Amino acid sequence: MADKTNEEQLAYLSELGVVPLVTLHSVEEAVPLAKALEEGGVPVAEVTFRSPYAIEGMKKIRDEVPGVTLVAGTVHTVEQAKASIEAGCKGLVTPAFTKSVVDYALENDVLILPGTAVPSDVDDAYQRGLRYVKFFPAEAYGGVKTLKALNGPFAEMKFLPTGGVSLKNAEEYLSLNNVFAIGGSFPVPSAAQKAHDWAAIAQACKDARALVEKVRGAKA
């Protein structure tokens, strides 16, 4: 992904259809976890700032598992944005529409998927020329029903719903034309991560990819 444009990166994420949310419990688990994502056919890690091990973990993945595309998640500040880019991240994801982070990313040609939850957030993104955004917290803000409603006035916008998305409801989200991918921790089950059961994580990723292919095959 190092030489890909932002548009090419978005096309790649759209092709995968799944963006795993990764919250590291230690620096040591970063590499085996990333390898499990790669083995499972979802070589993307949205490493969140919900953990103090985020930056060091990003660096480990960058250096030892270069096939995995790094994205920084739960980015609240420009300082976090800068640190994650220096650590090897190719994109930024914010939980809210944080104007300072969004504007920094746009000024520096960094891929940004800002968090949106209501029409005013989506319009803020639209006015800045963005057409791909995160929808968070998806289930709490009406989920599929809200995304269908947003498709009318914001037909050009594509969403990454995250928050309450699981294998149980993923098919509903993936069936929507304005959803380019789904995000969440379900490809990295917490019990498997705590047990360091990397094979289980790889299988969860395979299950997620199979669902994407099933839904998109049916839509084709």
Image (cartoon, grey):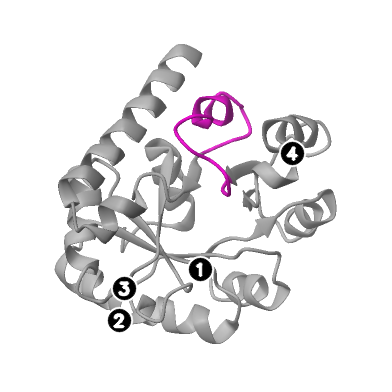
Distance from label 4 to label 2 (Cα)? 36 Å
Q: Which mark is residue 142?
A: 4
Q: Position of residue 52 (x, y in %)?
A: 40, 81
Q: Which residue is mark 3?
A: 58
In the rendered structure, does residue 80 fall within the stretch colored magenta?
no
In the rendered structure, does residue 178 fall within the stretch colored magenta?
yes
| Mark 1 residue crowding within 10 angstroms, few (<14) / some (14–19) / many (20+) | some
| Mark 4 residue crowding within 10 angstroms, few (<14) / some (14–19) / many (20+) | few
The first of marks 4 and 2 along the sequence is 2
Q: Callout 2, which amino acid?
A: Glu
Q: Callout 1, which amino acid?
A: Val
The first of marks 1 and 4 along the sequence is 1
Q: Position of residue 215 (x, y in %)?
A: 45, 20
Image point 58% across, 36% down: which residue? 179
Q: Which numbered mark, 1 or 4, is in the foreground of this view? A: 4
Circles 1 and 4, Cβ within 8 Å, touching? The answer is no
Q: Which numbered mark, 1 or 3, is in the foreground of this view? A: 3
Q: Callout 4, which amino acid?
A: Gly
Q: Callout 3, which amino acid?
A: Met
Q: Which mark is residue 48?
A: none
Circles 1 and 3, Cβ within 8 Å, touching? The answer is no
Q: Which residue is mark 2?
A: 56
- The front one of 197 and 152 is 197
Q: Which residue is mark 1?
A: 110
Circles 4 and 3, Cβ within 8 Å, touching? The answer is no
